[in-house]
Amino acid sequence: MKRGKDSPRPWLCLLGLLACLRLVVAALLPLSPDEAYYRIWALAPAASYLDHPPMVAAWIRLGMAFGGDDPLGVRLVGVLAGAGVSFFVFRAVRDLLPCAAPALAWRACALLQATLALAIQSVVMTPDMPVLFFLSVLLWVMGRIVAGGGARWWLAAGLVAGLAFDSKYTAVLPVAGIGLWWVGHGLWRRAPGQGRHWAAMAGGLALAVLCATPVLWWNATHGWVSFARQGGRTADWHPARAAQFLTELLAGQVGLMTPGIAAFFMWGQVRAWRQARQAPGAALLACFVAVPACVFVQHGIGDRVQANWPLVIYPALAVATALVGWRWARWAVGGGLLVGALVYGQALFAPLPLSSHADVALRQMAGWRGLAAEINAVARPGEFVAACDYGTAAELATVLPSRAVVGMEPRWALFNLPHDVTGGGIMVCNPRRVFDTDVFASVDRLGTVMRGRGGRVAEPVGLYRVQLRGDLSAAERQAMARLPVVGGK
């Protein structure tokens, strides 16, 4: 393998410029519905939540403490963590693949940062960024173990693995890959101080379980609803559509990596497998990727794999590119950055007349303030504003600070929020959705407004004047929660 002779300075400058650009984009983009929903989590702390573990809420709460209750505050920690991933990827390359020159380690960082996946996840706050960050740290910690850093690093590995689980459940897959490596490669047999080694491993496992305990406790006290929700995805099984699902999985990953970087990622894995017998670091990278990849392919045989699920293997894919001696990395990085820049430009300025189906930013982020103005034009003093889906309710809580915003779904019963909703208000719902009218004494349709920007429609929104029944049951009241609006009112 050729050693990289180019200076790391251009890669460092590139990574610094990317971090600055992403801070600006994160400040300018409106919140997506999921981000607005996670903001509610941050303002209603809990040990876990229906959809995911609590790490994303903790990061948002921390960011809002420094950046304020606005898009930059919600995303601040995620943007900084996205930049910080590069440090741990660099160190992982140096420890797992000591034959790689420093320039190749910086190149691996640039390839990861230039993916469309990182371009997106660095400027929107979802559980994917926390899990990416902690898995990058985990790779570095495992690199310390492979490099002979001492048994105590197993304690750090357990701690970081537990924090990754607290970010997203899919973290268990690459951690299982580490278990496969430990069993299959047998590096532990050659480690000095066997007693200390086993004690540290037991301590690391205990730390991982300790970190996961709040999530497990919350699920146990809430009927295991979160695990059931995630595990329930396997209930729909359509093997006759396996070709479609697997094609979508492959195409989606090539798109999120961008084609040039995908070539580096794939060839890096080939090289890792080829060197796995001789090099424990290469074997670790191969197992770290193989277990999640096999699970996602197996799932894709009978059901759709969401494009963001495989992001848990991206740090390891990037580290393995240090085994690839190709000289056209700048073209791959440049292509990825160009795609990311086009996505940013479309999201911010919408130069292309794309439909809401093709323009995700239009579909999710556009027109919420205009919708708020339409609601205020018809709402009477003292009326609440409610929504039939969690994303719309959360978005309205960010753009209607002067009104009580109410979420009306069974999921809201799981939140530590006020449930004393009474009287009447405006119900906001996409006309294609069917909402529960049993809780209302009256429902009067006011009309339909179009949420969007620049003459392009994101979605039609139906407005209804509603009056709650006076004899609502306790369960019905629990499913209605007053959401914290901007300013904490």
Image (tube, helix red, strand yellow):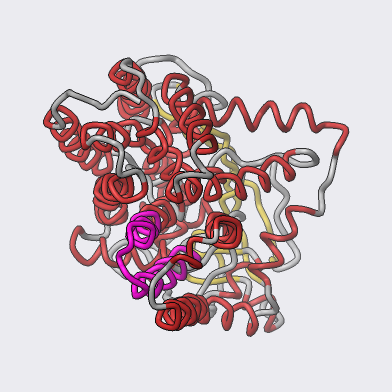
Residue at the spot 33% in from the left edge and 42% down from the top edge: 123
Question: Viewer-proximal residue, 341 or 141?
Answer: 141
Question: Viewer-proximal residue, 138 or 115?
Answer: 138
Q: Is residue 350 visible?
A: no
Give the x, y percent position of residue 132: 41, 51
Look at the image and say whether residue 156 sits in the magenta stretch: yes
Question: Viewer-proximal residue, 155 or 232?
Answer: 155
Q: In the image, is 71 to the left or to the right of 194?
A: left
Q: Is residue 272 above or below residue 65?
A: above
Q: Which residues are magenta?
A: 137-165
Look at the image and say whether residue 327 sits in the magenta stretch: no
Q: Quadrant of the C terminus?
A: bottom left
Total numbered labels placed on residues in the image: 0
Residue at the spot 46% in from the left edge and 51% down from the top edge: 280
Q: Is residue 362 above or below residue 397?
A: above
Give the x, y percent position of residue 421: 54, 75
Residue at the spot 35% in from the left edge and 61% down from the top edge: 141
Q: Is residue 426 above or below residue 271?
A: below
Q: In the image, is 140 to the left or to the right of 225?
A: left
Q: In the image, is 369 to the left or to the right of 387?
A: left
Question: Viewer-proximal residue, 380 or 374?
Answer: 374
What secondary structure predominates along the stretch shown in magenta? helix
Give the x, y percent position of residue 198: 48, 79
Give the x, y percent position of residue 208: 48, 75
Residue at the spot 63% in from the left edge and 64% down from the top edge: 409
Q: Is residue 411 visible?
A: yes
Q: Quadrant of the N terminus?
A: top left
- Residue lying farthest to the right in this orientation: 240
